[in-house]
């Protein structure tokens, strides 16, 4: 795909400084630019690269004024917000590269399934009994869609995803490769012999609209009722969300977060990587949880938590300062003990 500076400036409503007819064929970081590439500069700490980049076009803020000569081959497009405009171009580029409607073979669609308009179905994909697939859905190869599953319009499901029976996926969602939605929750009860007996998991998972789920995540079905991922939630790779969890609107979690069963996560909560959240608790709206923290009990008001167990960030910093001084404090205590012994002898 090729775009001229004039076309790009038209999309972004930007001002061209240089050759309006110059053409780019791809995107690149400014420090890794090559001929025919489009880059952007918004962070001043990367400014040095604009004077050596090989990119053909660079998007910059209106406020940018070069402090050195620019490469003669470089055309600038000035805009109000270079980062936002580059993100807009990425979206345009992504939309242009979307799969066209097609049902590749071999694949399987059950005769009772309802299929919307403009479906792309990759090879070796499976759509089960009574499934309902919306319009403009993209289902990549080796995806399994179980019985009675519902998928909303404009959703993309990447290779190797499995959606178990009865689960619901909303519109405009993206589910990345290898994720499993609706596997059994971790439900076992010991019997009189002390052996674990499986508790049937008869609920489902509901993923609302505009949710993005990273690769190799597991979202377990509810024991009864639903595990719910509310609208606008963003989940990174390798996250585990247990049975009957509810994640509130527009919350986000980084990689390797684990949330135990029946926890209720509020709206706009941000959870750092490798954080662990115990079951049957509530996290207040707008809470922030620092990476690798452990949350063992309910958080009643919005604050930033760090540590295991998680405590308010400023308290953690003070505690950590004390912890780092422990060797010095212990040495001082030993010295004082020795002095006390000497005084007692005298």
Image (cartoon, rainbow, N blue to C red):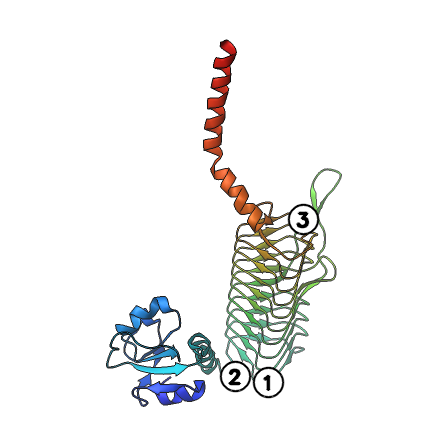
Q: Secondary structure at mark 1?
A: loop
Q: Observer-nearest residue: 140 or 78?
A: 78
Instruction: State which quadrant residue 127 falls in.
Output: bottom right
Whether the residues at callouts 1 and 2 have beta carbons within 8 Å, the answer is: yes
**Is residue 226 visible in the rendered structure shown here?**
yes
36 horizontally vs 13: left or right: left
Number of residue marks: 3
Say which label, 1 or 2, has the lower sequence index.
2
- In which quadrant of the rendered view does residue 202 lie? bottom right
Residue position marked by numbered label 1 in the rendering: 117
Q: Secondary structure at mark 2?
A: loop
Is residue 287 shown above or below 175? above
Left/right placement of residue 44 relative to residue 115 reads left
Would you place residue 240 above or below residue 97 in this image?
A: above
Position of residue 182 relative to residue 129, above or below, is above
Q: Residue furthest top?
A: 346
Marks 3 and 2, the one that precedes in the sequence: 2
In the picture provided, is 24 more to the left or to the right than 104? Answer: left
Q: How far is the residue under mark 1 from the one under mark 3?
A: 47 Å
Residue 132 numbered tag: none
- Alpha carbon of mark 1 to alpha carbon of mark 2: how far? 8 Å
Few, some or many residues within 10 Å of mark 1 (<14, 14–19, 20+):
few
Position of residue 336 measured from the top left corner of the image (x, y, whole percent): 49, 22
Tell me, yes or no, if residue 53 can be seen here: no
Q: Which residue is mark 2?
A: 101
Q: What is the distance, in whole Å, between disc 3 and disc 2 at their CAs?
A: 48 Å
Q: Position of residue 62 (x, y in %)?
A: 40, 80
Residue that carries the numbered disc 3 in the rendered image: 297
**How many residues crowd mark 3 within 10 Å: few (<14), some (14–19), many (20+)?**
some
What secondary structure is found at the residue carrying circle 3?
Answer: loop
Please state which of residues 24 and 192 is positioned toward the viewer in this rendering.
24
């Amino acid at each position: 795909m090729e775009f001229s500076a004039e076309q790009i400036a038209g999309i972004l409503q930007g001002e061209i400084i240089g050759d309006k007819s110059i053409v780019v064929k791809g995107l690149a970081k400014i420090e890794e630019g090559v001929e025919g590439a489009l880059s952007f500069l918004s962070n001043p700490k990367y400014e040095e690269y604009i004077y050596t980049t090989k990119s053909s076009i660079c998007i910059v803020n209106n406020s940018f004024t070069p402090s050195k000569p620019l490469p003669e081959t470089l055309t600038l497009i000035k805009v109000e917000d270079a980062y936002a405009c580059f993100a807009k171009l990425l979206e345009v580029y992504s939309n242009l590269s979307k799969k066209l409607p097609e049902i590749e073979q071999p694949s399987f669609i059950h005769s009772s399934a309802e299929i919307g308009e403009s479906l792309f179905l990759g090879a070796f994909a499976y759509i089960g009994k009574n499934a309902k697939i919306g319009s403009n859905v993209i289902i990549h190869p080796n995806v399994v869609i179980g019985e009675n599953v519902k998928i909303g319009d404009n959703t993309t499901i990447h290779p190797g995803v499995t959606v178990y029976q009865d689960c619901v996926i909303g519109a405009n969602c993206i589910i990345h490769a290898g994720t499993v939605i609706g596997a059994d929750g971790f439900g076992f009860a010991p019997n009189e012999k002390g052996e674990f007996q499986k508790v049937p998991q008869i609920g489902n998972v509901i993923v609302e609209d505009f949710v993005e789920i990273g690769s190799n995540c597991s979202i377990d079905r509810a024991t009864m009722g639903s595990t719910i991922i509310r609208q606008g939630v963003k989940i990174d790779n390798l996250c585990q969300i247990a049975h009957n969890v509810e994640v509130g609107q527009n919350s986000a979690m980084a990689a390797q977060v684990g949330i135990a069963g029946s926890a209720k996560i509020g709206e706009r909560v941000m959870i750092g990587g490798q954080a662990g959240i115990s079951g049957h608790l509530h996290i207040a709206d707008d809470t922030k949880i620092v990476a690798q923290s452990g949350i063992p009990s309910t958080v009643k008001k919005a604050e930033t938590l760090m540590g295991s167990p998680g405590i308010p960030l400023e308290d953690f910093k003070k505690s950590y300062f004390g912890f780092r001084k422990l060797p010095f404090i212990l040495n001082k205590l030993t010295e004082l003990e020795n002095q006390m012994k000497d005084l007692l002898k005298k």
